[in-house]
Image: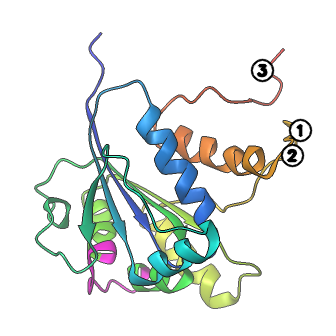
Amino acid sequence: MEQEIRKIIVAVTGASGQVYAKHLLRKLGELDLPLSEMAVVFSENARKVWDYEIGAAFAASGKEKLYGNDDLFAPFASGSSRYDTMIICPASMGTIGRIAGGTSEDLIARSADVILKEKRKLIVVPRETPYNLIHIRNLETLALAGGIICPASPSFYSMPGTVDDLVMTVVDRILSLAGFSPDTFRWMEND
C-alpha cells in the first residue's frame, strides 16, 4: 500500500515552552515518511521567546520552508491548498483567542481558520497554567470547531530521566495525534 504524502504546517507562537517546538521540528525532520512539505511560521514574539529560552536564534535545518506571519500569500492561507495538518506549538492564549474569535489578521490565525473550515486536523498545544474561564471557553470553541487540544502536560509513567525525555512525552503525543507513528513509550505496551 502506498503511503500518503503529507503536507503540514507548524506554527510557533510566543508562549513559554519553545523547547517543545524545537524537539517537534527536529522529530518531524527525522521522520521516515513522505513529508512533501513542512511549512513553519513563527509569530514575532515566538522568535524572541525562542532566543531567550533556547539561548540561540532559530536555525533552520533545511527540511522546512519558513513563512513570515504577515505572508497571507502563503499557499496554506487558502482552502484550495493541500495541507492536511496544522500544529500550533506552543500555542499562546492570545493566538488561541484570535483563532476562537475568527480573526484572520495574520498567517497563523488565517491558516488555523482554513484548516478548521476545511475539516482538516488542527492540533493546538497550549502552554499556560492555570487556565482562566476565557481560556477554557476559547479552547472549548476550538474543540467544538474540530480542533484537538493537546496541553503541554508531560507524562511520567515512562520514567523520563531528563528534561528532554520529559518534553518528548508531549512531542510524541503530538506526532501520534498528527497521524505519525513515533517510536515511543506506550502505557502497558512496552515490555
- Identify which residue is drawn at 45% across, 81% down: 95
Which quadrant of the structure image shows residue 182? top right
Residue 155 lies within the magenta run: no
Q: Quadrant of the N terminus?
A: top left
Label 3 or label 1, whichever lies nearer to me, is: 1
Sequence-first disc among 3 and 1: 1
Q: Foreground residue, 134 or 186? A: 186
The amino acid type found where label 1 is placed reads Met
Q: Is residue 153 above or below residue 105?
A: above
Q: Which mark is residue 159?
A: 1
Label 1: element kind: loop
Label 2 and label 1: CA atoms lie apart by: 5 Å
Label 3: element kind: loop
The amino acid type found where label 2 is placed reads Phe
The amino acid type found where label 3 is placed reads Glu
Magenta span: predominant SS is loop
- Identify which residue is drawn at 61% across, 83% down: 135
Q: Is residue 113 left or right of residue 186?
A: left
Contact check, label 2 and label 1, Cβ < 8 Å? yes
Q: Foreground residue, 141 or 121? A: 121
Residue 131 rendering spot, x and y as whole percentages: 71, 82
